[in-house]
Image: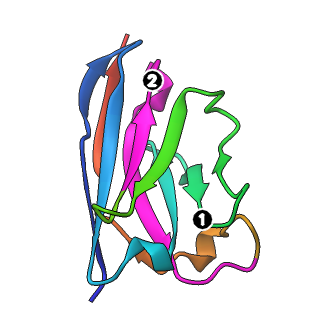
Amino acid sequence: QVQLVESGGGAVQAGDSLTLSCALSGDSFTAYGGGWFRQAPGKDREFVASTRWIRGSIFYGDFVKGRFTISIDHTKNTMYLQMNSLQPEDTAVYYCAAARFCSGYKCRPSEYDYWGQGTQVAVSS
């Protein structure tokens, strides 16, 4: 069956960078749209970034402001989230997700079929 396994989280200082990885097994990422979400303690899940094979279908949450980059390496069947200039408010558990079918250029959260287990990112000031 399809599984997503995240890695790359950790504890960093404000201004540092991290790259999260999301390895997909059981299928090919070429068949899916990929997304990253995060959830901080006491807060709702928040959209971070998403990508599909359709040109122009990369989206970021408003808070990203050019600091994060989402990508998929199809040779490794792995999705990445490169995060630069991290701030304490970026502290959260980050989840990756894969959607088989999306109704538009941007997949809705309800359209994601598979989710990873989450990886913790902690940013101190």
Question: Is 96 contained in the magenta span?
Answer: yes
- From the viewer's perspective, is 32 left or right of 6? right
Residue at coordinates 48% horizontally, 54% vertically from top-left?
36
- From the viewer's perspective, is 43 left or right of 106? left
Residue 84 is tagged as 2
Q: Secondary structure at mark 1?
A: loop
What residue is pinned by disc 1?
52
Callout 1 environment at 10 Å: few (<14), some (14 to 19), or many (20+)?
many
Answer yes or no: is residue 65 visible.
Answer: yes
Residue at coordinates 67% horizontally, 66% vertically from top-left?
54
**Residue 97 position by quadrant:** bottom left
Task: Look at the picture and state if 106 lies above or below 61.
Answer: below
Answer yes or no: is residue 118 visible.
Answer: no
Q: Secondary structure at mark 2?
A: loop
Q: Which residues are magenta?
A: 79-103
- From the viewer's perspective, is 91 left or right of 34? left
Q: In front of the other: label 1 or label 2?
A: 1
Question: Is 111 contained in the magenta span?
Answer: no
Quarter of the image with the N terminus in it: bottom left
Residue extending farthest front: 75
Q: Position of residue 87 (x, y in %)?
A: 46, 19
Task: Look at the picture and state if 68 lies above or below 41.
Answer: above
**Residue 86 position by quadrant:** top left
In terms of sequence position, does the residue under pointer 1 or pointer 2 come before the other? Answer: 1
Q: Position of residue 112 (x, y in %)?
A: 53, 75
